[in-house]
Image: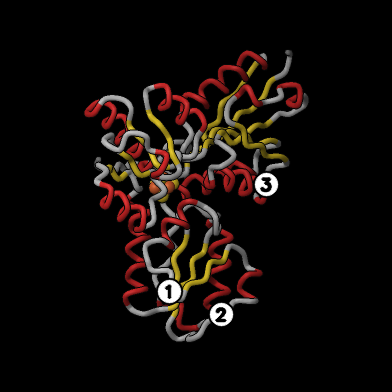
Amino acid sequence: MSESVNIYIAEPRGFCAGVRRAIALVEKALDDFGAPVYVRHEIVHNKHVIEDLKNKGVIFIDDLSEMQDKTRPLIFSAHGVPQSVVDETLKQGIKTIDATCPLVAKVHNQIKRLYKNDMEIIVIGKPNHVEIIGTIGQIPPSAKLHVISKLEDIETLEVSNSQNIGFVTQTTLSVDDTKEIVAVLKQKFGSISEMKKDDICFATTNRQKAVKEMAKEVDLCIVIGSKNSSNSKQLKEVALKNGAKEAILIDDYQELDFTSLKGIKNIGITAGASAPEYLIQDLLYQLQKYYDNINIIPIKVEYEKVDFKL
Ligand code: SF4
Protein backbone atom coordinates (compact mmCIF):
# COMPACT_ATOMS: atom_id res chain seq x y z
CA MET A 1 0.00 0.00 0.00
CA SER A 2 1.72 3.20 -1.12
CA GLU A 3 -0.30 5.73 0.79
CA SER A 4 0.29 7.95 3.74
CA VAL A 5 -2.25 8.99 6.32
CA ASN A 6 -2.67 11.33 9.28
CA ILE A 7 -3.95 9.51 12.35
CA TYR A 8 -5.49 11.78 14.97
CA ILE A 9 -5.70 10.15 18.38
CA ALA A 10 -8.05 11.54 21.00
CA GLU A 11 -6.89 12.04 24.57
CA PRO A 12 -8.42 11.17 26.91
CA ARG A 13 -9.95 8.00 25.52
CA GLY A 14 -10.77 4.50 26.75
CA PHE A 15 -10.99 3.33 30.36
CA CYS A 16 -12.35 5.84 32.87
CA ALA A 17 -11.85 5.75 36.62
CA GLY A 18 -15.23 4.06 37.22
CA VAL A 19 -14.50 1.26 34.76
CA ARG A 20 -10.98 0.70 36.11
CA ARG A 21 -12.41 0.44 39.63
CA ALA A 22 -15.21 -1.96 38.61
CA ILE A 23 -12.82 -4.34 36.80
CA ALA A 24 -10.32 -4.16 39.66
CA LEU A 25 -13.07 -5.11 42.12
CA VAL A 26 -13.96 -8.19 40.08
CA GLU A 27 -10.31 -9.20 39.83
CA LYS A 28 -9.85 -8.69 43.56
CA ALA A 29 -12.91 -10.84 44.25
CA LEU A 30 -11.42 -13.61 42.10
CA ASP A 31 -8.14 -13.32 44.03
CA ASP A 32 -9.79 -13.22 47.44
CA PHE A 33 -12.55 -15.81 46.98
CA GLY A 34 -11.40 -17.85 43.97
CA ALA A 35 -13.60 -18.71 40.97
CA PRO A 36 -16.41 -18.61 40.27
CA VAL A 37 -17.72 -15.21 41.24
CA TYR A 38 -21.00 -13.88 39.90
CA VAL A 39 -21.51 -10.46 38.35
CA ARG A 40 -24.98 -9.04 37.89
CA HIS A 41 -25.17 -7.65 34.35
CA GLU A 42 -22.02 -6.99 32.27
CA ILE A 43 -19.59 -5.37 34.69
CA VAL A 44 -18.94 -2.74 31.98
CA HIS A 45 -20.28 -2.73 28.44
CA ASN A 46 -17.36 -4.17 26.52
CA LYS A 47 -17.19 -7.49 24.72
CA HIS A 48 -13.45 -8.01 25.27
CA VAL A 49 -13.56 -7.19 28.98
CA ILE A 50 -16.45 -9.61 29.44
CA GLU A 51 -14.75 -12.44 27.52
CA ASP A 52 -11.54 -11.96 29.48
CA LEU A 53 -13.35 -12.10 32.84
CA LYS A 54 -15.40 -15.12 31.77
CA ASN A 55 -12.15 -16.92 31.04
CA LYS A 56 -10.96 -16.09 34.54
CA GLY A 57 -14.04 -17.64 36.14
CA VAL A 58 -16.68 -14.91 36.24
CA ILE A 59 -20.30 -15.90 35.64
CA PHE A 60 -22.47 -13.05 34.37
CA ILE A 61 -26.15 -13.16 35.27
CA ASP A 62 -29.10 -10.84 34.75
CA ASP A 63 -31.25 -12.17 37.56
CA LEU A 64 -30.52 -13.59 41.01
CA SER A 65 -32.47 -16.73 40.09
CA GLU A 66 -29.58 -17.61 37.73
CA MET A 67 -27.13 -17.96 40.64
CA GLN A 68 -26.62 -21.68 40.98
CA ASP A 69 -24.40 -21.36 44.06
CA LYS A 70 -25.60 -18.61 46.39
CA THR A 71 -22.63 -19.05 48.71
CA ARG A 72 -20.43 -17.39 46.07
CA PRO A 73 -19.98 -13.60 46.00
CA LEU A 74 -22.09 -11.46 43.71
CA ILE A 75 -20.78 -8.18 42.28
CA PHE A 76 -23.04 -5.33 41.17
CA SER A 77 -21.94 -3.79 37.86
CA ALA A 78 -20.61 -0.23 37.42
CA HIS A 79 -24.06 0.86 36.21
CA GLY A 80 -25.67 0.34 39.62
CA VAL A 81 -28.69 -1.70 40.68
CA PRO A 82 -32.21 -0.90 41.92
CA GLN A 83 -32.70 -0.98 45.69
CA SER A 84 -35.00 -4.02 45.27
CA VAL A 85 -32.00 -6.08 44.10
CA VAL A 86 -29.97 -5.06 47.15
CA ASP A 87 -32.92 -5.96 49.41
CA GLU A 88 -33.31 -9.35 47.75
CA THR A 89 -29.62 -10.23 48.18
CA LEU A 90 -29.89 -9.32 51.88
CA LYS A 91 -32.98 -11.48 52.21
CA GLN A 92 -31.24 -14.43 50.54
CA GLY A 93 -28.02 -13.91 52.51
CA ILE A 94 -25.91 -13.42 49.38
CA LYS A 95 -22.49 -11.83 49.92
CA THR A 96 -22.27 -8.79 47.61
CA ILE A 97 -19.60 -6.39 46.37
CA ASP A 98 -20.77 -3.09 44.97
CA ALA A 99 -18.86 -1.94 41.86
CA THR A 100 -21.34 0.85 41.11
CA CYS A 101 -19.34 3.84 39.85
CA PRO A 102 -19.19 6.52 42.59
CA LEU A 103 -20.55 9.02 40.05
CA VAL A 104 -23.60 6.84 39.41
CA ALA A 105 -24.00 6.47 43.18
CA LYS A 106 -24.01 10.29 43.36
CA VAL A 107 -26.97 10.36 40.97
CA HIS A 108 -28.69 7.73 43.15
CA ASN A 109 -28.26 10.01 46.15
CA GLN A 110 -29.58 12.96 44.19
CA ILE A 111 -32.77 11.19 43.09
CA LYS A 112 -33.34 10.00 46.67
CA ARG A 113 -32.94 13.58 47.90
CA LEU A 114 -35.50 14.84 45.37
CA TYR A 115 -37.91 12.12 46.41
CA LYS A 116 -37.43 12.87 50.10
CA ASN A 117 -38.25 16.52 49.38
CA ASP A 118 -41.47 15.33 47.77
CA MET A 119 -40.49 16.70 44.37
CA GLU A 120 -41.70 15.58 40.97
CA ILE A 121 -38.69 14.07 39.20
CA ILE A 122 -37.61 14.20 35.57
CA VAL A 123 -35.01 11.61 34.60
CA ILE A 124 -33.11 12.40 31.41
CA GLY A 125 -31.81 9.18 29.90
CA LYS A 126 -32.59 6.10 27.88
CA PRO A 127 -35.60 4.40 29.56
CA ASN A 128 -34.32 0.83 29.16
CA HIS A 129 -30.68 1.47 29.91
CA VAL A 130 -29.45 -0.50 32.91
CA GLU A 131 -28.13 2.65 34.60
CA ILE A 132 -31.53 4.35 34.37
CA ILE A 133 -33.28 1.23 35.68
CA GLY A 134 -30.91 1.32 38.67
CA THR A 135 -31.42 5.06 39.21
CA ILE A 136 -35.21 4.89 39.08
CA GLY A 137 -35.08 1.85 41.33
CA GLN A 138 -33.66 3.95 44.17
CA ILE A 139 -37.09 5.37 44.89
CA PRO A 140 -40.49 3.71 45.29
CA PRO A 141 -42.64 3.13 42.17
CA SER A 142 -45.21 5.53 43.66
CA ALA A 143 -42.84 8.51 43.10
CA LYS A 144 -43.94 11.20 40.64
CA LEU A 145 -41.45 10.48 37.91
CA HIS A 146 -41.02 11.05 34.16
CA VAL A 147 -38.26 9.63 31.95
CA ILE A 148 -37.39 11.66 28.88
CA SER A 149 -34.66 11.04 26.34
CA LYS A 150 -35.13 13.70 23.67
CA LEU A 151 -36.33 17.25 23.15
CA GLU A 152 -39.67 16.19 21.68
CA ASP A 153 -40.53 14.37 24.91
CA ILE A 154 -40.77 17.75 26.65
CA GLU A 155 -43.63 18.89 24.42
CA THR A 156 -45.94 16.23 25.83
CA LEU A 157 -44.54 16.34 29.36
CA GLU A 158 -47.13 17.28 31.94
CA VAL A 159 -46.27 17.77 35.57
CA SER A 160 -48.62 18.24 38.49
CA ASN A 161 -46.69 21.07 40.17
CA SER A 162 -44.24 22.98 37.99
CA GLN A 163 -42.91 24.82 41.07
CA ASN A 164 -41.60 21.66 42.61
CA ILE A 165 -39.56 19.72 40.04
CA GLY A 166 -36.04 18.40 39.93
CA PHE A 167 -34.08 16.39 37.42
CA VAL A 168 -31.24 13.89 37.22
CA THR A 169 -29.47 12.60 34.13
CA GLN A 170 -27.77 9.44 32.95
CA THR A 171 -23.99 9.85 33.27
CA THR A 172 -23.13 8.89 29.69
CA LEU A 173 -25.38 11.05 27.49
CA SER A 174 -24.35 13.51 24.82
CA VAL A 175 -23.20 16.66 26.64
CA ASP A 176 -24.57 18.97 23.93
CA ASP A 177 -27.95 17.24 23.53
CA THR A 178 -28.47 17.20 27.27
CA LYS A 179 -27.59 20.91 27.57
CA GLU A 180 -30.29 21.59 25.01
CA ILE A 181 -32.85 19.44 26.85
CA VAL A 182 -32.06 21.14 30.17
CA ALA A 183 -32.35 24.59 28.57
CA VAL A 184 -35.81 23.76 27.20
CA LEU A 185 -36.87 22.30 30.54
CA LYS A 186 -35.81 25.54 32.22
CA GLN A 187 -37.83 27.52 29.69
CA LYS A 188 -40.90 25.40 30.28
CA PHE A 189 -40.58 25.10 34.05
CA GLY A 190 -38.80 28.20 35.33
CA SER A 191 -38.23 26.93 38.84
CA ILE A 192 -36.27 23.87 37.69
CA SER A 193 -33.37 26.24 37.04
CA GLU A 194 -32.65 26.17 40.77
CA MET A 195 -31.65 22.54 40.55
CA LYS A 196 -28.06 21.42 40.25
CA LYS A 197 -26.49 21.00 36.83
CA ASP A 198 -26.66 17.78 34.86
CA ASP A 199 -24.89 14.65 36.09
CA ILE A 200 -22.99 13.72 32.94
CA CYS A 201 -19.66 12.53 34.27
CA PHE A 202 -16.24 14.08 33.70
CA ALA A 203 -15.04 11.06 31.68
CA THR A 204 -17.96 11.26 29.25
CA THR A 205 -17.50 15.02 28.96
CA ASN A 206 -13.74 14.82 28.32
CA ARG A 207 -14.00 12.06 25.73
CA GLN A 208 -16.68 13.95 23.83
CA LYS A 209 -14.67 17.17 24.03
CA ALA A 210 -11.63 15.45 22.47
CA VAL A 211 -13.76 13.93 19.71
CA LYS A 212 -15.29 17.32 18.93
CA GLU A 213 -11.80 18.75 18.42
CA MET A 214 -10.71 15.79 16.35
CA ALA A 215 -13.85 15.54 14.21
CA LYS A 216 -13.05 18.80 12.40
CA GLU A 217 -9.91 17.25 10.97
CA VAL A 218 -10.97 13.79 9.90
CA ASP A 219 -12.66 11.98 7.04
CA LEU A 220 -13.29 8.94 9.18
CA CYS A 221 -13.59 8.65 12.94
CA ILE A 222 -13.08 5.15 14.35
CA VAL A 223 -14.57 4.61 17.80
CA ILE A 224 -13.42 1.45 19.55
CA GLY A 225 -16.21 0.20 21.79
CA SER A 226 -19.10 -2.21 21.99
CA LYS A 227 -22.49 -1.55 20.42
CA ASN A 228 -24.25 -1.67 23.82
CA SER A 229 -21.92 0.94 25.33
CA SER A 230 -23.84 4.17 25.71
CA ASN A 231 -20.81 6.45 25.91
CA SER A 232 -19.16 4.76 22.89
CA LYS A 233 -22.32 5.26 20.80
CA GLN A 234 -22.34 8.91 21.83
CA LEU A 235 -18.73 9.36 20.67
CA LYS A 236 -19.72 8.21 17.19
CA GLU A 237 -22.68 10.62 17.14
CA VAL A 238 -20.56 13.51 18.45
CA ALA A 239 -17.99 12.87 15.70
CA LEU A 240 -20.66 12.97 12.99
CA LYS A 241 -22.28 16.11 14.37
CA ASN A 242 -18.98 17.96 14.57
CA GLY A 243 -17.50 17.49 11.15
CA ALA A 244 -16.32 13.91 10.65
CA LYS A 245 -17.49 12.77 7.21
CA GLU A 246 -17.96 9.26 8.51
CA ALA A 247 -17.82 7.54 11.88
CA ILE A 248 -17.88 3.89 12.82
CA LEU A 249 -18.15 2.02 16.10
CA ILE A 250 -16.24 -1.25 16.14
CA ASP A 251 -15.19 -3.68 18.86
CA ASP A 252 -11.71 -4.18 17.43
CA TYR A 253 -9.61 -3.85 14.25
CA GLN A 254 -10.99 -7.16 12.97
CA GLU A 255 -14.32 -5.43 12.34
CA LEU A 256 -12.64 -2.78 10.19
CA ASP A 257 -12.98 -3.17 6.44
CA PHE A 258 -9.50 -2.03 5.40
CA THR A 259 -10.52 -1.82 1.73
CA SER A 260 -12.89 1.03 2.71
CA LEU A 261 -9.87 3.15 3.76
CA LYS A 262 -8.79 3.71 0.17
CA GLY A 263 -8.33 7.41 -0.47
CA ILE A 264 -8.83 8.42 3.17
CA LYS A 265 -6.09 10.79 4.29
CA ASN A 266 -7.21 11.73 7.79
CA ILE A 267 -8.43 9.18 10.34
CA GLY A 268 -9.47 9.93 13.90
CA ILE A 269 -9.33 7.28 16.62
CA THR A 270 -10.88 7.18 20.06
CA ALA A 271 -12.34 4.61 22.45
CA GLY A 272 -15.34 4.48 24.74
CA ALA A 273 -14.86 4.55 28.51
CA SER A 274 -15.21 0.76 28.74
CA ALA A 275 -12.75 -0.14 25.95
CA PRO A 276 -9.24 -1.32 26.90
CA GLU A 277 -6.24 0.55 25.45
CA TYR A 278 -4.70 -2.58 23.89
CA LEU A 279 -7.53 -2.54 21.32
CA ILE A 280 -6.40 0.90 20.16
CA GLN A 281 -2.77 -0.22 20.02
CA ASP A 282 -3.77 -3.30 17.98
CA LEU A 283 -5.65 -1.06 15.55
CA LEU A 284 -2.66 1.27 15.22
CA TYR A 285 -0.38 -1.66 14.56
CA GLN A 286 -2.65 -2.89 11.75
CA LEU A 287 -2.88 0.60 10.26
CA GLN A 288 0.89 0.84 10.36
CA LYS A 289 1.08 -2.37 8.35
CA TYR A 290 -1.57 -1.13 5.90
CA TYR A 291 -0.10 2.30 5.13
CA ASP A 292 3.45 3.13 4.00
CA ASN A 293 3.61 6.12 6.19
CA ILE A 294 1.51 7.20 9.13
CA ASN A 295 1.73 10.50 10.89
CA ILE A 296 0.34 10.33 14.44
CA ILE A 297 -1.21 13.52 15.80
CA PRO A 298 -2.49 13.48 19.40
CA ILE A 299 -5.53 15.65 20.17
CA LYS A 300 -5.26 16.18 23.87
CA VAL A 301 -7.94 18.25 25.58
CA GLU A 302 -7.68 17.20 29.23
CA TYR A 303 -5.34 15.42 31.54
CA GLU A 304 -7.40 12.98 33.61
CA LYS A 305 -5.88 12.11 36.93
CA VAL A 306 -9.01 10.88 38.71
CA ASP A 307 -8.86 7.47 40.34
CA PHE A 308 -11.54 5.95 42.56
CA LYS A 309 -10.54 3.96 45.61
CA LEU A 310 -11.62 0.32 45.77
S1 SF4 B 1 -18.34 6.73 32.30
FE1 SF4 B 1 -18.42 8.09 34.10
S2 SF4 B 1 -20.14 7.35 35.30
FE2 SF4 B 1 -19.63 5.72 33.84
S3 SF4 B 1 -18.18 4.42 34.95
FE3 SF4 B 1 -16.94 5.92 33.86
S4 SF4 B 1 -16.62 7.59 35.37
FE4 SF4 B 1 -18.33 6.34 36.09
Give the labeled residue for mark 1.
142
Give x and y (percent) for residue 88.
Answer: 32, 53
Marks 1 and 2, the one that precedes in the sequence: 1
Residue type (three-letter) at the residue carrying disc 2 = Gln
Q: Residue at x 61, y 32 (%)?
A: 250
Q: Secondary structure at mark 3?
A: helix
Image mark for residue 187:
2
Query: Of residues 188 and 217, which is closer to you in this image?
Result: 188
User: What is the crowding at mark 1: few (fewer than 14 residues within 10 Å), some, or many (at least 20)?
Assistant: few
Q: Is residue 212 visible?
A: no
Marks 1 and 3, the one that precedes in the sequence: 1
Scheme by which the image is coloured? secondary structure
Q: CA distance from mark 1 to mark 2?
A: 27 Å
Q: Residue at x 36, y 57 (%)?
A: 84
Q: Is residue 224 left or right of residue 13?
A: right
Q: Quadrant of residue 38?
A: top left
Give the labeled residue for mark 3.
240
Q: Secondary structure at mark 2?
A: helix
Query: Of residues 71 and 151, which is closer to you in this image?
Result: 71
Give x and y (percent) for residue 70.
Answer: 30, 38
Q: Are marks 2 and 3 in contact (CB under 8 Å)?
A: no
Query: Of residues 255 and 160, which is closer to you in this image?
Result: 160
